[in-house]
Amino acid sequence: MKNLKKIIAIALAGVMTMGAIVGCGSSGNSGSGYPTKGVTVICPWSAGGGTDSCLRAFSDALGKELGQTFTVDNRTGGGGVVGHEAIANAEKDGYTIGMITFELSTYGPLGTSQLTSDSYDLLCRVNTDAASVTVNAKWAQENGITDLKSFIDYCKAHPGEVQMGGSSNASVWHIAGGYLMEETGIDIHMITYEEGAATAVQNAAGGFINGVTVSLAEARSFIESGDLICLGVMDEERNPAFPDVPTCKEQGVNATYFTWRGLATPKGLDESQLTTLRNACAKAIENEDFKSYMKNAGQTISYLDADAYGAFLKQNATDVAAAMKALGM
């Protein structure tokens, strides 16, 4: 009998020990040490664009924080609607998240989607990027265009002839062209690209269109190759990666305009998973490799935590709707 009691006591001790181990492993991590496998990160825009490159760099930093691979999945189409819907409609298991962008604020006014910032659980804002006026270098040389003023003068002398690319219809870089026209009184022909800015930049570099109103980061490789030349950036200060490129304001054009990008999950994610991801984002934003990449790419790190990001998005939706109305969109 004594031996039997001893065996039972040992068995019970083992069960208690196992329970303690399981409980320890689940603390703050949604019951399973989340994440226990790789995470898919949806990008609503094409590979090679500013959103894609920023997201890949940040996904690498997140992966290092959480010890899993964060793999970018480009879901393009519909002016970003396809990708944004894919994020909102993904399984609420913590293994599919995504990057939402400026265009989310345009879907309501356009009537293209019912998605809003309330369709997601927010993680953080990662980046803001100012628009630029960037043109084909050969075309500029042939027409005596050396700065923003000479570009504006040329456009006024050739109304409606200059073709500038953005991304999709009513996207951030399409609206950037509208802002430029409003501020300068010029008439340019905006060409849209549903898959995103990467194609617009390639077409501008190849001379198929005259230029683009995208970010410096997205045009960088072709600026450095000499195929494109940036005439001005729509920001308050010069971009540290392009110290020789003046702002539009420096050249007498009061145009300040930027996109934003941040991470979100499907609405209704487990709170402990949200906490894990938000804490990882706060650490990943300080990752030295990520900061170095963003600096070299000419992209601005503009971190906001989930609460501040939510407040920003509410105001941004109101401001963008007003701007689109003013531009007749």
Image (spheres, rainbow, N blue to C red):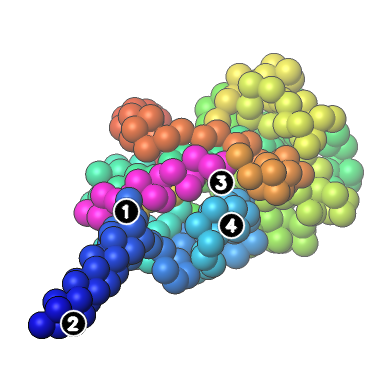
> What's the mark number on residue 27?
1
Instruction: Assign a secondary structure to mark 3.
Output: helix
Q: Which residues are magenta?
A: 267-285
Q: Is residue 183 above or below residue 130?
A: above
Q: Is residue 267 above or below residue 194?
A: above
Left or right of 142, for residue 47: left
Question: Which tag, 3 or 1, sits closer to the chain's start?
Answer: 1
Q: Is residue 61 visible?
A: yes
To which residue does mark 3 refer? 284
Give the Cα distance between marks 3 and 1. Answer: 21 Å
Q: Indicate which label's residue lies in the foreground, 3 or 1.
A: 1
Left or right of 278, for residue 154: right
Q: Is the Cβ of the residue at disc 3 closer than 8 Å to that at disc 1?
A: no
> What's the mark number on residue 110?
none
Q: Is the Cβ of the residue at disc 4 closer than 8 Å to that at disc 1?
A: no
Question: Which tag, 2 or 1, sits closer to the chain's start?
Answer: 2
Q: Amino acid at mark 2?
A: Asn
Give the Cα distance between marks 4 and 1. Answer: 20 Å
Asked where in the image residue 232 lies, by quadrant, the reply is top right
Q: Indicate which label's residue lies in the foreground, 2 or 1.
A: 2
Question: Which tag, 4 or 1, sits closer to the chain's start?
Answer: 1
Residue occupying the point 73% across, 44% down: 292
To which residue does mark 2 refer? 3
**Image quadrant where one finds the N terminus:** bottom left
The front one of 207 and 218 is 218
**Image quadrant where one finds the C terminus:** top left
Q: Amino acid at mark 1?
A: Ser
Q: Position of residue 127 (x, y in %)?
A: 55, 40
To which residue does mark 4 refer? 64
Residue occupying the point 45% across, 53% down: 99
Q: Position of residue 312 (x, y in %)?
A: 38, 30
